[in-house]
């Protein structure tokens, strides 16, 4: 069976900021869809480990520091449960679908590192953002999830709530595979490997562009996980 007709697990985080190396998880969702089975959803709201949620981030996802601290689960517990949920998905051979996976997968990895928890095992990831840039490189305009939903005729119920975004990412991936037969023809492993190369090329192209203005600009090319820095020998 073609990968896009099987089960998918959408994964999305709402967080405290744009840097996956330092941001903390506010909400998370893993939603399993497809393969003519019922949709299953797991949601988390964390206490952000007692940290503040900046006003800009709260304006995007609607979770204030007060709400997170009052109603959220301890962040370490939530991270352990998210890792366990995604590990089950990976061991079942189900792909993780994450829009701009480099951000969410890396951020989860750094939370795991902070709390001394085991990292995720390797498994196939499908990233509608990387795929879209590859199959429709020169289309003008934004490539946000909202923009991709419009481009691929996908309904987005409530942008910037983790569960709606996770479902929408799966729907976009499915539409991409039905619109571009070369994607549907790949195995999950082939698609994952292809995206590693595509993401690196896309980053290199963007870096070249940025360097016209700032010669020191660096665009991260690793995907879906920015590797942990090797500890400098002391």
Image (cartoon, rainbow, N blue to C red):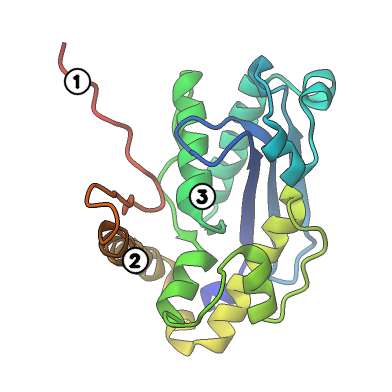
Q: Between residues 194 and 159, which one lies in front from this camera angle?
A: 159
Q: Residue at x 29, y 67 (%)?
A: 205
Q: Is residue 100 left or right of residue 61?
A: left
In the rendered image, which residue does mark 3 sit on?
A: 90
Give the residue at x 43% y 41%. Answer: 121
| Up-down relation of residue 193 to residue 215 (above or below) | below
Q: Nearer the viewer, residue 28 or 150?
A: 150
Q: Secondary structure at mark 1?
A: loop
Above/below status of 182 relative to 197: below
View extreme (front): residue: 213
Residues marked 3 and 1 touching at CB (< 8 Å) = no
Q: Secondary structure at mark 3?
A: helix
- Mark 2–mark 3 Cα distance, whole angstroms, equals 26 Å
Which one is in front in this view, the residue at disc 2 or the one at disc 3?
Answer: 2
Residue 65, located in which quarter of the rendered image? top right
- Residue annotated with mark 1: 232
Residue 181 is situated, as x and y percent measured from the top left of the image, at: 48, 88
Spatial CA distance of label 2 from label 1 is: 29 Å
Is residue 58 shown left or right of residue 4?
right
Label 2 or label 1, whichever comes before in sequence order? 2
The crowd level at tag 2 (other Cα within 10 Å; few <14, some 14-19, many 20+) is some
Residue 230 locus on image (x, y percent):
24, 28
- Numbered circle sitting on residue 18: none
Q: In the displayed structure, does residue 224 sit left or right of residue 234?
A: right
Q: Earlier in the sequence, mark 2 or mark 3?
A: 3
In terms of sequence position, does the residue under pointer 3 or pointer 1 come before the other?
A: 3
At x 71%, y 61%, the residue is 167
Do residues under tags 2 and 1 come within 8 Å of each other at their CB atoms?
A: no
Q: Is residue 27 above or below residue 31?
A: above
Quarter of the figure that contains the N terminus: bottom right
Which residue has dot 2 on it? Answer: 202
């Amino acid at each position: 069976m073609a990968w896009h007709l099987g089960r998918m697990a959408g994964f999305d985080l709402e967080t405290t900021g744009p840097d996956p190396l330092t941001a903390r998880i506010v909400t998370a969702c893993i939603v399993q869809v497809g393969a003519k089975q019922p949709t299953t959803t797991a949601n988390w709201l964390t206490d952000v480990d007692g940290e503040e949620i900046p006003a800009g981030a709260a304006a995007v996802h609607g979770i204030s520091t007060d709400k997170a601290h009052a109603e959220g689960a301890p962040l370490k517990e939530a991270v352990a449960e998210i890792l366990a949920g995604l590990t089950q998905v990976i061991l079942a051979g189900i792909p993780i679908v994450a829009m701009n996976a480099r951000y969410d997968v890396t951020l989860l990895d750094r939370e795991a590192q902070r709390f001394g928890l085991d990292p995720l095992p390797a498994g196939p990831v499908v990233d509608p953002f990387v795929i879209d840039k590859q199959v429709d490189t020169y289309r003008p305009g934004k490539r946000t999830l909202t923009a991709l939903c419009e481009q691929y005729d996908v309904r987005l119920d409530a942008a910037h709530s983790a569960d709606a975004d996770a479902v929408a990412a799966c729907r976009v991936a499915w539409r991409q595979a039905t619109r571009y037969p070369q994607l549907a023809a790949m195995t999950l492993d082939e698609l994952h490997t292809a995206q590693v190369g595509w993401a690196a090329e896309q980053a290199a192209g963007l870096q070249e562009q940025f360097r016209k203005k700032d010669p020191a600009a660096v665009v991260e090319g690793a995907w879906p996980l920015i590797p942990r820095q090797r500890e400098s020998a002391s």
